[in-house]
Image (spheres, rainbow, N blue to C red):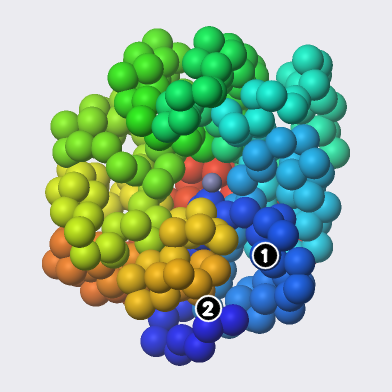
């Protein structure tokens, strides 16, 4: 892991340590981070094998939790009975804390929007049925995402927020949380800093989206939860508070949103 001894209590509310780039050192890295500066990590599943990874690995580490769900990029390779398969996973682990990563991605023209909407809506309904928060991905799809948030009113987080100040205000008014990744620290990302101004401290989450989105200072590298201190420093600068209190508050926010206090750690 990277060396940083300035900060502790980092809670990474959005990670993908099942990525192949962690195959060489996954357990070493997770063990080192959990025994030093990281107090919690949530795995966000992207397809059914990724859900299985989350169930297996969250059982290995006391402060590792998992979301289960199908990411919009997997509309082409998921089974028809995916909701039933997700339902069957729920009783297998008390560390399933959310439905995610779900949402809409209109970045590529060849992605079937009708099918994405169907997949997203069915998982919003699944989350509501089981009273679970959602972890939402929205890329170039703000209008449709907001329409569905207004209609279904889920609890949860809009992750890797890239929208406007106005959209952030509406997401907050709907009762949701907003997550920022290393992208917040990029020098040309004034829009994200502006959107952050709309987010009260008690609705903010910090995340890596690792292995992607390494913050400024580590750009081009594989990202990891320990790097989140850079995002906290940026938040501290915008909000006029100290970085450690940003980490402490966002860790509490994540535990509250995902109901983590009630899960035993032994
Ligand atoms: Zn993600």
Residue at position x 56%, y 61% in the image: 211
**Where is residue 88 shown, x and y percent of the image?**
84, 27
Q: Quadrant of residue 131?
A: top right
Residue at position x 28%, y 63% in the image: 186
Could you tell me if residue 209 is visible in this image?
yes
**Where is residue 241 shown, x and y percent of the image?**
20, 69
Looking at the image, residue 69 lies above or below residue 190 = above
Residue denoted by label 2:
37
Q: Nearer the viewer, residue 110 or 234?
A: 110
Residue denoted by label 1:
21
Looking at the image, residue 82 lies above or below residue 17 = above
Identify the image quadrant of the C terminus.
bottom right
Q: SS class of the residue under badge 1?
A: helix
Q: In the image, 236: left or right of 95?
A: left
**Where is residue 108 shown, x and y percent of the image?**
46, 30
Is the CB atom of the residue marked by disc 1 within 8 angstroms of ligand 1's nearest atom?
no
Residue at position x 74%, y 19% in the image: 83
Looking at the image, residue 172 lies above or below residue 37 = above
Q: Residues within 10 Å of mark 1 (few under 14, many from 20)?
A: few
């Amino acid at each position: 892991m990277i060396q940083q001894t300035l900060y502790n209590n980092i809670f990474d509310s959005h990670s993908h340590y099942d990525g192949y780039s962690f195959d060489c050192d996954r357990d070493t890295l997770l063990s080192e981070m959990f025994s030093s500066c990281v107090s919690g990590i949530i795995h966000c599943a992207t397809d059914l094998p990724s859900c299985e990874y989350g169930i297996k690995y969250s059982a290995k580490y006391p402060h590792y939790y998992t979301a289960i769900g199908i990411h919009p990029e997997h509309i082409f390779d998921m089974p028809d009975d995916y909701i039933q398969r997700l339902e069957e996973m729920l009783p297998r682990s008390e560390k399933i804390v959310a439905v995610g990563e779900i949402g809409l991605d209109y970045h590529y023209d060849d992605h079937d929007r009708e099918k994405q909407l169907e997949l997203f809506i069915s998982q919003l309904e699944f989350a509501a049925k089981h009273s679970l928060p959602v972890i939402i991905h929205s890329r170039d799809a703000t209008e449709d995402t907001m329409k569905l948030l207004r209609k279904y009113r889920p609890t949860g987080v809009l992750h890797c927020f890239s929208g406007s100040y106005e959209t952030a205000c509406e997401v907050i008014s709907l009762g949701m949380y907003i997550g920022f990744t290393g992208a917040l620290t990029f020098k040309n990302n004034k829009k994200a800093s502006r959107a952050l101004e709309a987010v009260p401290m008690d609705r903010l989450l910090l995340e890596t989206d690792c292995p992607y989105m390494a913050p400024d200072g580590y750009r081009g590298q594989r990202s990891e939860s320990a790097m989140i201190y850079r995002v906290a420093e940026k938040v501290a600068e915008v909000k006029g508070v100290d970085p450690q209190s940003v980490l402490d508050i966002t860790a509490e926010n994540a535990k509250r949103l995902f109901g983590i206090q009630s899960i035993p750690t032994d």
